[in-house]
Image (tube, rainbow, N blue to C red):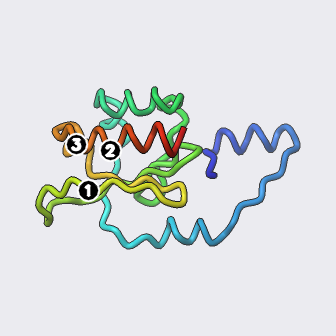
């Protein structure tokens, strides 16, 4: 389980030290899926993104962009680059606390992808 910097600072202030498994960090940082450049300011203007954060009980202030992915505290979220692929609707995965999805533009136009995402959020993340 990952935490964001604010949560880490709060736990440190309380005298709680954290241990984390290095192999899971390696998995996240060496993931070979092409990703999309992330702009938190632009994402915060997209209603679907705000709805997802709301469902996870996370504010935009708790979200950090790190190495091409979003650190949401409990999970990391990475957007896939679908420019070279056809609209394959089976691209949402959640493994080792890493959520891989197409861009929010792709998600917002596909009912099937949104259903997959909500299913993952409600059954695997929450």
Q: Which residue is mark 3?
A: 112
**Front one among 73 and 65:** 73
Rendering coords of residue 90 (x, y %): 26, 56
Q: Which residue is mark 2?
A: 116
Rendering coords of residue 53 (x, y %): 45, 32
Rendering coords of residue 91 (x, y %): 28, 57
Q: Which mark is residue 90?
A: 1
Examine the rendered structure and indicate whether residue 74 appears above or below residue 36: above
Residue positioned 53% across, 48% down in the render: 75
Residue positioned 53% across, 28% down in the render: 57
Q: Secondary structure at mark 3?
A: helix
Q: Number of marks in the image?
A: 3
Farthest left residue in view: 86
**Front one among 60 and 21:** 21
Which is nearer the N-term, disc 1 or disc 2?
1
Quadrant of image for the C terminus? top right
**Front one among 121 and 42:** 121
The answer to which quarter of the image holds residue 41 is top left
Q: In the rendered structure, are the residues bearing label 3 and label 2 in contact, judged by CB atoms less than 8 Å apart?
A: yes
Residue positioned 44% across, 55% down in the render: 94
> Separation of disc 3 and disc 1 at Cα?
9 Å
Q: Which mark is residue 25?
A: none
């Amino acid at each position: 389980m990952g935490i964001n910097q604010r949560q880490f600072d709060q736990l440190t202030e309380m005298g709680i030290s954290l241990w984390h498994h290095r192999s899971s960090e390696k998995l996240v940082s060496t993931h070979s899926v092409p990703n999309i450049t992330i702009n938190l300011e632009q994402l915060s203007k997209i209603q679907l993104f705000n709805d997802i954060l709301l469902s996870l009980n996370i504010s935009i202030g708790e979200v950090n962009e790190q190495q091409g992915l979003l650190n949401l505290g409990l999970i990391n979220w990475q957007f896939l680059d679908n420019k070279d692929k056809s609209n394959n609707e089976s691209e949402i995965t959640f493994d080792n606390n890493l959520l891989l999805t197409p861009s929010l533009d792709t998600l917002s136009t596909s009912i099937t992808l949104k259903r997959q995402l909500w299913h993952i959020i409600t059954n695997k993340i929450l």
